[in-house]
Amino acid sequence: MVLPALISYQLESRRKIQFCNFGVSFFRGTAKLFSMKSVHLQANVPKPKVIVLAGPTGSGKSELALRLCERIGGEIVSADSVQIYKHLQVGANKPSLEELERVPHHLVSSVELDANFTAGEFCRLAKSAMEDIISRGRIPVVCGGTMMYVQWLVHGVPDAPKSNPDAQASAAKMLEPYREKGQWEAALELLKERNQSGQKNCLQMTGTA
């Protein structure tokens, strides 16, 4: 069975950052790096600054990232919303001690279990880790399956307001009667009504209604 994966090479150019995509095949659990040599040794292709490897669970990303880092002198930046937490081992599929010795890993077992960790916070920590790796003359290889993390890191954090604790408390209080009775469909309808009402008010305030 051949499963698709995606490697994005972030290359420097005079005009802008470019993302060049290359296909990688997995056959019977073995990753084939058939294109890596030709890509890196071409004189007219700049050395990649950041490599992003993303794909579904079980597609072989981790082993490919390890082999890739060993070949090009890279370090792995994990983009996994479970591996980021300390003390969480079951179901996390964290790198083994042997794998940690093979290649340095970043953002694995980095935050406490009770931390209010967001995708925006991940981007901040990931960028800091990548800058550190690059400053030491090595190549960051971002590897993971949490696609929100990957999308925000590659394309930028959306311009959206931060969560408001007061608004969260108000919403929880409003939904409490529905929660107690298990009336989730009715709760969803209430949220839809409030959302439509809020959008209408915003349009009226901006004069676009």
Image: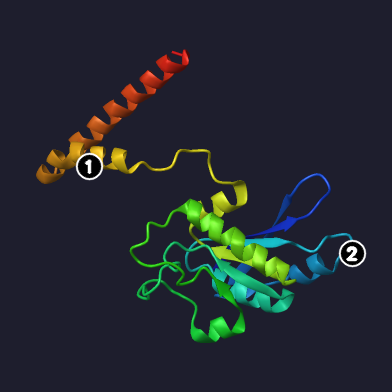
- The answer to whether 209 appears left or right of 22 in the picture is left
- Pick the front one: 116 or 140: 116
Q: Label 1 amino acid?
A: Ala
Outermost front residue: 166
Q: Label 2 amino acid?
A: Ala
- The answer to whether 26 appears left or right of 109 in the picture is right
Q: Position of residue 9 (x, y in %)?
A: 71, 59
- Residue occupying the point 64% across, 73% down: 75
Q: Is residue 61 above or below residue 199?
A: below
Q: In which image quadrant can residue 71 be found?
A: bottom right
- Pick the front one: 121 or 69: 121
Q: In which image quadrant can residue 165 be found?
A: top left
Outermost right residue: 43
Outermost left residue: 181
Identify the residue position indicated by label 2 in the image.
43
Residue 39 numbered tag: none
Identify the residue position indicated by label 1 in the image.
172
Q: Position of residue 42 (x, y in %)?
A: 86, 65
